[in-house]
Amino acid sequence: MAKVRVGVAGYGVIGQRLADGVALQKDMELVGIADVAPTLSVRALREKGMPYALYCAAEDKRADLEKAGIPVSGSLEDLVRSVDVMLDATNAGVGAKNKELYAKFGKKGIFQGGEKNSVADVFFHGYANYEKGIGAQFLKLTSCNTTGLIRAVDCLDRAVGVEKVAITIIRRVADPGDYHRGLTNALQIDQAPSHQALDLMTIMPHIDATGILVHTPVTHGHIITVVASTKKDVSVENAIEFFSAHPRIRVVSIAEGFLGNASFFRYARDLGNPRGDMYEIGLWKDSIVKSGKDLMFAINIPQESVTIPETMDGIRACMGMQKDRIEGTNKTNEYLGIGKWKDLA
């Protein structure tokens, strides 16, 4: 069976991780990536010997790339013509414009969380609604926070049923290396309910969700607290068992040294993971407590890398590579090396 040919538009924080993720999938081929400027990410790609072919996403910017010594393989249109599916990781709003090009050539497209839901046929999550993405032309991924949140809630929902959740997101203000937020020394609260709670209900309409979001002046990871009302009474011990069985949830404890968000980033670097990335969300077993019949717990979201596995799932679904959500997500996990650490437990 021929490999699915994939292109990536936008080689920034998410785009470069998507490119690496596709390159690891043995049943996919990364045809190339597209960008418009010799950014640090593109310059680093050149210094690494151009392992991925670069296409210029705007013809009037080609000279800037060539002046910086970046070899250009063609235009964005050339890339789109050569692939089966495009992963769009451009800035919000750009993907909607690129969609017109994808549609023109009858190609499939998968957009990241920054785009409006209307850009796609299906608002997609690999575990929660994989089947809805099968054969669709355009998918949109959930945001990093929503992706990790749904993993945990879906895991619990499939085990005991979830009626409603209330969440609090302690949100990092910017990615490492970003300056667009300025230098801050404050916490900022958004108007409730948070869009992550609303997005969860779009993916999982049978669950009532609401939430509060607080921006914090840190860069490595978000932390989300969840209060879940379950249909069946569940003990802390049962919850640990359910979460521990999920390939994309890493159950940890404070005693092991996981004191907070920075602990996960440091651990990922110590593991030798590229860019200090971790595909799994972290879930503190110490945080799992009962409040009456409700269950409360806290998760860590590695915002730069958490959506990569679900995007690979999206390729599998829209291209019909696997028709079952477990088969599809398991194949993604296999190629990304997700969950292999559980074998050491």
Image (cartoon, rainbow, N blue to C red):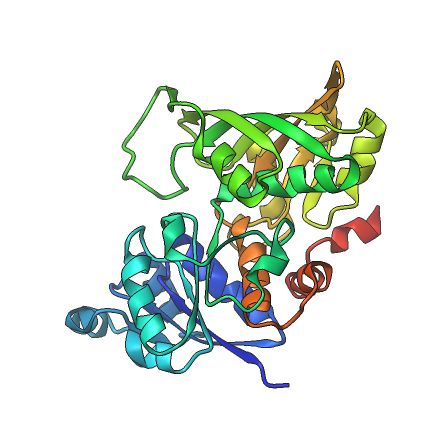
Against 120, is 243 above or below? above
Which quadrant would residue 126 be assigned to in this image?
bottom right
Percent x, y of residue 61: 18, 69
Residue placed at 62% from the left, 33% from the top? 299
Q: Quadrant of residue 229?
A: top right
> From the viewer's perspective, is residue 271 above or below residue 55?
above
- Which residue is drawn at the image coordinates 54% and 39% (left, top)? 200
Residue 66 shown left or right of residue 262 in the figure: left
Tell me what residue is drawn at x 33 percent, y 42 percent. Answer: 178
Q: Nearer the viewer, residue 23 or 113?
A: 113
- Tell me where residue 133 appears, x and y as whole percent: 56, 61
* Residue 308 falls left or right of residue 42: right
Q: Is residue 67 visible?
A: no
Q: Where is residue 56 shown, x and y percent of the image? A: 27, 72
- The percent position of residue 311, horizontal first and vertical second, equals 53, 59
Task: Give the total number of marks visible in the rendering.
Answer: 0
Examine the rendering and report whether any part of residue 310 can be seen: yes
Nearer the observer, 121 or 338: 121
